Image (tube, rainbow, N blue to C red):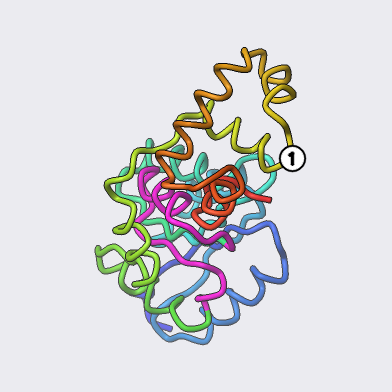
Amino acid sequence: MHSSSITVLIVDDHPVLREGLSAVIHAEDDMRVVAEAANGVEAIECFDRHRPQITLMDLRMPELDGLAATLSIRSRWPSARIVMLTTYRGDVPALRALKAGASGYLLKSMMRTHLLEAIRTVAAGSRYIPLEIASELAAHVADEALSDREVEVLRRIASGGANKAIASLLHLSEETVKSHIRNILAKLSANDRTHAVTIAIQRGIIEM
């Protein structure tokens, strides 16, 4: 281990995953783990204390998620280099992470093959987005995003809600709900409600 080692902060709410990541990193001569955190609040505190070169940040965590923690850290330390880790596929979570200021994005299923390369690439000042995620982002770059209300309507459809029930729950008229559904189908190039839900799950717009 030499003094110019890449310093790493690991942030994940699963102790076993943190342990595994730590073991992989400790086995490398050019990097070392300086701290671990179990949620976004701890992540911000650990970052302030240790100023790691690389933060491996889980996207979904209790108390404060990875997006909020990334925004907070980068508002104070704009040069912070954060690699977002997630189990969720799709271009939408990836885009959110990059917009929040992440320098890298990695599915947990890819960590065995991509983790060390991601750390070294981001530490060197470049972005790291694996090809399959980059391809998904590129495929939807011109798509019009769903509004928050449209996403809410889509969630209700996915839960099996009929238009009347959705209208009642969201305090909208049934005609407004129908209008939202028309927009959703158009934006997602979906044939019907079921197709729209399938596309939305694949792209990470909603989760089931």
Q: Is residue 72 above or below residue 179?
A: below
> Please, which residue is most extreme toward the front here?
191
Task: Name the secondary structure under disc 1.
Answer: loop
The picture places residue 70, in percent across and down from the top left corner, at 46, 45
| 115, 44: nearer the viewer | 115
Residue 40, picture quadrant: top right
Q: Is residue 105 above or below residue 73?
A: below
Residue 156, picture quadrant: top right
Span colored in magenta: 87-111
- Name the residue at 38% across, 72% down: 118
- Name the residue at 43% across, 79% down: 116
Q: Looking at the figure, which quarter contains the N terminus?
A: bottom left
Tell me how many marks there are.
Answer: 1
What crowding class fits label 1: few (fewer than 14 Cα within 10 Å), some (14-19), or many (20 or more)? few
Q: Is residue 44 above or below residue 102?
A: above
The picture places residue 203, in percent across and down from the top left corner, at 49, 54
| 113, 159: nearer the viewer | 159
The picture places residue 147, in percent across and down from the top left corner, at 46, 30
Residue 93: in magenta span: yes
The picture places residue 113, in percent across and down from the top left corner, at 47, 83
Q: Which residue is mark 1?
A: 160
- Name the residue at 43% across, 45% down: 188
Q: Which amino acid type is shown beneath numbered disc 1?
A: Gly
